[in-house]
Amino acid sequence: MTQEWVLRHPSLARVRHGFFTRLGGVSEGPYASLNCSMRSGDVPEALAENRARVAREMGVAATHLMGVTQVHGDGVAVVADIWDRGPEADAMVTTRTDVALGVITADCGPVLFMAEGGAVVGAAHAGWRGAVGGVIEATLDAMAGLGARRETIVAVVGPCITQSSYEVGPNMRDAALALDALAEGYFEPGARAGHFQFDLPGYCVARLQRAGVSHAAATGVDTMRDEQRFFSHRRRTLAGGGQIGHQISVIAAYA
């Protein structure tokens, strides 16, 4: 994996993909520099240029960098046609080779999928709500609908907040365990009484493995601690709030 403006993972070497950092763009201020969120409040011209740079890196037209309106749910959109602004969903799948699927994060887990040697790909936005709510399994099901066999699916969880940085309260833990009792193994006691440290990437990998994919991995990169390369909601909150940019993680089917 390189340390440039985009990180790649050897497990996905068969397909065009990238976990893009916040480096290499033109945005300024709190959005500096490769902000790719359509809902961030960034200057439209800067946002368009940033996304065009990502599209070029992926080998697709700027109009073919596809996204959805993320809502922390388990909805999956099948990309069969080109849209200007995607539907409400938190994942996409496709067999088209002329599009790239991009999910936006700033601590949540971006999960990139490929199957059938790269003929079917997917991308999911997995925060804790989406992960315990089934967005990973919903993505796998949607890929199966496009002809992907579960045993051929490879998935990688990209840069996100890791356990040492992710302190949560008892309400979040209780909500997660109400949906998936097996999530208990991914909470460790926190430094503060009554608080816990949640292993989001480890939990996502476990859900992938439980679902029977052929290979699941995580980059292990912590967005909260790496301020130079990544935007982070948690870091922004600890600093008192304010505007923030978001990075993008992208995959395209084997051409």
Image: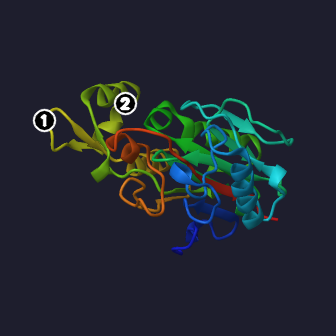
Up-down relation of residue 56 to residue 250 (above or below): below
Q: 215 or 23, which lies in front?
A: 23
Element type at mark 1: loop
Q: Dot 2 corresponds to which residue?
A: 176
* 1 and 2 marks in contact (CB < 8 Å): no
Three-letter amino acid code of the residue under disc 2:
Ala
Label 1 CA crowd tier, 10 Å (few <14, some 14–19, many 20+)? few
Percent across and percent down for residue 143 are: 70, 45
Up-down relation of residue 179 to residue 58 (above or below): above
Q: 194 or 14, which lies in front?
A: 194
Label 2 CA crowd tier, 10 Å (few <14, some 14–19, many 20+)? some
**Residue positioned 43% across, 37% down in the render:** 128
Report the side of 128 relative to 27 (left or right).
Answer: left
Q: Quadrant of residue 226?
A: bottom left
Percent across and percent down for residue 122 are: 67, 49
Q: Quadrant of residue 100?
A: bottom right
Q: 174 or 52, which lies in front?
A: 52
Q: Which mark is residue 221?
A: none
**Residue positioned 28% across, 52% down in the render:** 164
Report the side of 90 relative to 1 (left or right).
Answer: right
Three-letter amino acid code of the residue under disc 1:
Ala
* On-image quarter of the C terminus: bottom right
Q: Dot 1 corresponds to which residue?
A: 193
**Residue positioned 40% across, 50% down in the render:** 161
Residue 95 visible to the viewer: no
